[in-house]
Image (spheres, helix red, strand yellow):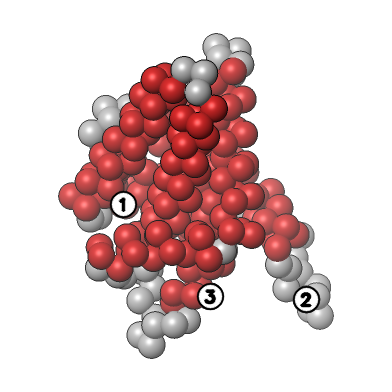
Amino acid sequence: MALFRPSYLKEGPGIEKDAPPKTGLALFFEILGREFWQVLGLNLLFLVCALPLVTFGMARAALSKCTVNMVRDRPNDVWYDFRRQLTQDWKRNTLFGLAELFCVGLLLTGSRLAGGSVAALAAVLMGAVFCGLFFGYLWPMAVAVDLPVKALLKNALILPLACLHHSLPALAVGALLGVLSFWLFPLSLPLVLFIPFGLSSFVMSFAAWSDIKRLIIRGNNNGGENI
Protein backbone atom coordinates (compact mmCIF):
# COMPACT_ATOMS: atom_id res chain seq x y z
CA MET A 1 0.00 0.00 0.00
CA ALA A 2 1.52 3.30 -1.15
CA LEU A 3 0.44 5.24 1.95
CA PHE A 4 2.54 3.11 4.29
CA ARG A 5 5.29 1.85 2.00
CA PRO A 6 8.75 2.65 3.39
CA SER A 7 10.15 5.50 1.31
CA TYR A 8 13.59 3.90 1.06
CA LEU A 9 12.08 1.17 -1.16
CA LYS A 10 11.34 3.69 -3.91
CA GLU A 11 13.67 4.04 -6.86
CA GLY A 12 14.88 7.59 -7.33
CA PRO A 13 16.32 9.35 -10.37
CA GLY A 14 19.78 9.37 -8.80
CA ILE A 15 22.07 12.29 -8.04
CA GLU A 16 24.74 13.69 -10.29
CA LYS A 17 28.24 13.10 -8.95
CA ASP A 18 29.18 16.78 -8.75
CA ALA A 19 25.73 18.15 -7.90
CA PRO A 20 25.78 20.52 -4.89
CA PRO A 21 23.57 19.48 -1.96
CA LYS A 22 20.14 21.11 -2.00
CA THR A 23 19.10 23.46 0.76
CA GLY A 24 16.11 25.60 1.68
CA LEU A 25 12.95 25.32 -0.40
CA ALA A 26 14.63 23.14 -3.02
CA LEU A 27 15.43 20.55 -0.35
CA PHE A 28 11.97 20.94 1.21
CA PHE A 29 10.12 20.17 -2.00
CA GLU A 30 12.50 17.36 -2.91
CA ILE A 31 11.84 15.57 0.38
CA LEU A 32 8.12 16.33 0.31
CA GLY A 33 7.81 14.95 -3.22
CA ARG A 34 9.51 11.74 -2.13
CA GLU A 35 7.55 11.41 1.13
CA PHE A 36 4.17 12.73 -0.01
CA TRP A 37 2.23 9.46 0.20
CA GLN A 38 3.82 8.70 3.54
CA VAL A 39 2.64 12.08 4.83
CA LEU A 40 -0.94 11.26 3.79
CA GLY A 41 -0.84 7.93 5.60
CA LEU A 42 0.73 9.56 8.63
CA ASN A 43 -2.12 12.08 8.87
CA LEU A 44 -4.66 9.25 8.99
CA LEU A 45 -2.65 7.32 11.58
CA PHE A 46 -2.44 10.39 13.78
CA LEU A 47 -6.19 11.04 13.65
CA VAL A 48 -7.05 7.47 14.58
CA CYS A 49 -4.61 7.38 17.49
CA ALA A 50 -5.37 10.91 18.78
CA LEU A 51 -9.17 10.58 18.80
CA PRO A 52 -9.39 9.39 22.44
CA LEU A 53 -7.72 12.76 23.34
CA VAL A 54 -5.93 11.24 26.34
CA THR A 55 -3.60 9.63 23.77
CA PHE A 56 -3.17 12.91 21.90
CA GLY A 57 0.32 13.54 23.27
CA MET A 58 1.53 10.04 22.40
CA ALA A 59 0.15 10.39 18.86
CA ARG A 60 1.62 13.89 18.54
CA ALA A 61 5.06 12.60 19.50
CA ALA A 62 4.76 9.72 17.02
CA LEU A 63 3.69 12.14 14.29
CA SER A 64 6.70 14.37 14.95
CA LYS A 65 9.09 11.43 15.11
CA CYS A 66 8.06 10.32 11.63
CA THR A 67 8.25 13.78 10.07
CA VAL A 68 11.58 14.53 11.75
CA ASN A 69 12.93 11.28 10.28
CA MET A 70 11.73 12.45 6.88
CA VAL A 71 13.40 15.86 7.05
CA ARG A 72 16.58 14.27 8.38
CA ASP A 73 16.48 12.25 5.16
CA ARG A 74 16.65 8.95 7.01
CA PRO A 75 15.17 5.70 5.71
CA ASN A 76 11.76 5.50 7.32
CA ASP A 77 8.73 3.30 7.60
CA VAL A 78 5.79 5.36 8.85
CA TRP A 79 3.81 2.37 10.12
CA TYR A 80 6.72 0.93 12.11
CA ASP A 81 8.18 4.24 13.33
CA PHE A 82 4.77 5.55 14.44
CA ARG A 83 3.94 2.42 16.45
CA ARG A 84 7.39 2.34 18.02
CA GLN A 85 7.28 5.99 19.15
CA LEU A 86 3.78 5.68 20.66
CA THR A 87 5.10 3.82 23.70
CA GLN A 88 8.35 5.74 24.15
CA ASP A 89 8.34 8.36 26.93
CA TRP A 90 4.56 8.01 26.95
CA LYS A 91 4.07 9.59 30.38
CA ARG A 92 6.03 12.71 29.46
CA ASN A 93 4.38 12.95 26.04
CA THR A 94 0.92 12.49 27.54
CA LEU A 95 1.54 15.44 29.86
CA PHE A 96 2.85 17.56 26.98
CA GLY A 97 -0.22 16.62 24.94
CA LEU A 98 -2.65 17.48 27.74
CA ALA A 99 -0.88 20.83 28.15
CA GLU A 100 -1.28 21.55 24.43
CA LEU A 101 -4.97 20.60 24.49
CA PHE A 102 -5.46 22.83 27.55
CA CYS A 103 -3.89 25.76 25.70
CA VAL A 104 -6.11 25.13 22.66
CA GLY A 105 -9.19 25.02 24.88
CA LEU A 106 -8.13 28.20 26.66
CA LEU A 107 -7.61 30.02 23.36
CA LEU A 108 -10.97 28.87 21.98
CA THR A 109 -12.70 30.01 25.16
CA GLY A 110 -10.89 33.33 25.01
CA SER A 111 -11.92 33.90 21.40
CA ARG A 112 -15.58 33.29 22.27
CA LEU A 113 -15.48 35.57 25.30
CA ALA A 114 -13.64 38.30 23.42
CA GLY A 115 -16.75 39.25 21.46
CA GLY A 116 -16.00 42.28 19.29
CA SER A 117 -13.13 43.56 21.41
CA VAL A 118 -10.15 44.18 19.13
CA ALA A 119 -7.72 44.19 22.05
CA ALA A 120 -9.02 40.87 23.40
CA LEU A 121 -8.92 39.24 19.97
CA ALA A 122 -5.38 40.53 19.44
CA ALA A 123 -4.35 39.03 22.78
CA VAL A 124 -5.89 35.68 21.78
CA LEU A 125 -4.09 35.81 18.42
CA MET A 126 -0.76 36.55 20.11
CA GLY A 127 -1.37 33.68 22.52
CA ALA A 128 -2.15 31.36 19.61
CA VAL A 129 1.07 32.34 17.82
CA PHE A 130 3.13 31.85 20.97
CA CYS A 131 1.59 28.43 21.68
CA GLY A 132 1.97 27.37 18.05
CA LEU A 133 5.66 28.27 18.05
CA PHE A 134 6.30 26.69 21.44
CA PHE A 135 4.67 23.33 20.74
CA GLY A 136 5.80 23.39 17.11
CA TYR A 137 9.41 23.27 18.29
CA LEU A 138 8.85 21.27 21.49
CA TRP A 139 7.65 18.11 19.75
CA PRO A 140 10.48 17.74 17.20
CA MET A 141 13.00 18.47 19.95
CA ALA A 142 11.39 15.98 22.34
CA VAL A 143 11.64 13.10 19.86
CA ALA A 144 14.99 13.98 18.26
CA VAL A 145 17.21 15.23 21.09
CA ASP A 146 17.99 13.60 24.44
CA LEU A 147 17.39 16.46 26.87
CA PRO A 148 15.77 16.72 30.30
CA VAL A 149 12.27 18.17 30.44
CA LYS A 150 13.43 21.50 31.87
CA ALA A 151 15.87 22.00 29.00
CA LEU A 152 13.24 20.98 26.44
CA LEU A 153 10.80 23.57 27.77
CA LYS A 154 13.44 26.29 27.94
CA ASN A 155 14.68 25.64 24.40
CA ALA A 156 11.11 25.45 23.05
CA LEU A 157 10.50 28.91 24.50
CA ILE A 158 13.67 30.50 23.14
CA LEU A 159 14.52 28.72 19.88
CA PRO A 160 11.46 29.61 17.76
CA LEU A 161 11.71 33.26 18.88
CA ALA A 162 15.40 33.33 17.97
CA CYS A 163 14.64 31.82 14.55
CA LEU A 164 11.47 33.63 13.51
CA HIS A 165 12.56 33.58 9.86
CA HIS A 166 12.01 29.81 9.98
CA SER A 167 9.36 29.33 12.65
CA LEU A 168 6.82 31.97 11.60
CA PRO A 169 6.47 30.87 7.94
CA ALA A 170 6.12 27.24 9.07
CA LEU A 171 3.45 28.21 11.58
CA ALA A 172 1.65 30.26 8.93
CA VAL A 173 1.42 27.23 6.63
CA GLY A 174 -0.06 25.13 9.44
CA ALA A 175 -2.52 27.89 10.34
CA LEU A 176 -3.63 28.22 6.71
CA LEU A 177 -4.28 24.48 6.46
CA GLY A 178 -6.27 24.60 9.70
CA VAL A 179 -8.37 27.60 8.60
CA LEU A 180 -9.15 26.03 5.24
CA SER A 181 -10.13 22.75 6.89
CA PHE A 182 -12.45 24.56 9.33
CA TRP A 183 -14.09 26.97 6.89
CA LEU A 184 -14.76 24.37 4.20
CA PHE A 185 -16.01 21.62 6.52
CA PRO A 186 -17.72 19.19 5.77
CA LEU A 187 -16.53 19.60 2.17
CA SER A 188 -12.99 19.54 3.52
CA LEU A 189 -13.41 16.14 5.21
CA PRO A 190 -11.13 14.34 2.69
CA LEU A 191 -8.55 17.09 3.31
CA VAL A 192 -8.84 16.65 7.08
CA LEU A 193 -8.38 12.88 6.83
CA PHE A 194 -5.23 12.98 4.75
CA ILE A 195 -3.46 16.33 4.76
CA PRO A 196 -3.45 19.05 7.47
CA PHE A 197 -1.86 17.37 10.49
CA GLY A 198 0.73 15.35 8.59
CA LEU A 199 1.70 18.20 6.28
CA SER A 200 1.77 20.79 9.09
CA SER A 201 4.03 18.52 11.15
CA PHE A 202 6.30 18.00 8.15
CA VAL A 203 6.60 21.75 7.52
CA MET A 204 7.27 22.56 11.18
CA SER A 205 9.73 19.69 11.54
CA PHE A 206 11.63 20.92 8.49
CA ALA A 207 11.90 24.41 9.98
CA ALA A 208 12.62 23.26 13.53
CA TRP A 209 15.16 20.57 12.68
CA SER A 210 17.51 22.96 10.89
CA ASP A 211 17.51 25.22 13.96
CA ILE A 212 17.77 22.34 16.44
CA LYS A 213 20.71 20.85 14.55
CA ARG A 214 22.49 24.19 14.26
CA LEU A 215 21.89 25.63 17.73
CA ILE A 216 21.17 22.68 20.05
CA ILE A 217 22.97 19.59 18.78
CA ARG A 218 26.14 21.28 17.51
CA GLY A 219 26.39 23.17 20.78
CA ASN A 220 26.27 19.93 22.76
CA ASN A 221 29.61 18.14 22.96
CA ASN A 222 28.06 14.67 23.16
CA GLY A 223 25.51 15.35 20.41
CA GLY A 224 22.42 14.35 22.36
CA GLU A 225 20.79 13.15 19.17
CA ASN A 226 18.13 10.43 19.38
CA ILE A 227 18.26 7.59 16.87
Image x and y of residue 154, in percent: 34, 64
Foreground mark, 2 or 3? 3
Q: Is residue 5 left or right of residue 49?
A: right
First in residue order: circle 2 vs circle 1: 2
> Regarding mark 3 in the picture, which secondary structure is present there?
helix
Disc 2 to disc 3, C-alpha distance: 20 Å
Q: Position of residue 25 (x, y in %)?
A: 72, 57
Q: CA distance from mark 2 to mark 1?
A: 35 Å
| Residue shown at 50% from the left, 23% from the top | 117
Which amino acid, by three-letter code, is at mark 2? Pro
Q: Is residue 23 left or right of residue 149?
A: right
Mark 3 = which residue? 214
Residue 48 in which image quadrant: top left
Residue with the mark numbered 1: 84
What amino acid is found at the position of numbered circle 3 in the picture? Answer: Arg
Spatial CA span between label 3 and label 1: 27 Å
Asked whether disc 3 touches disc 1, contact meaning CB atoms under 8 Å apart, the reply is no
Q: Which mark is residue 20?
A: 2
> Could you tell me residue 153's position as x and y percent?
32, 60
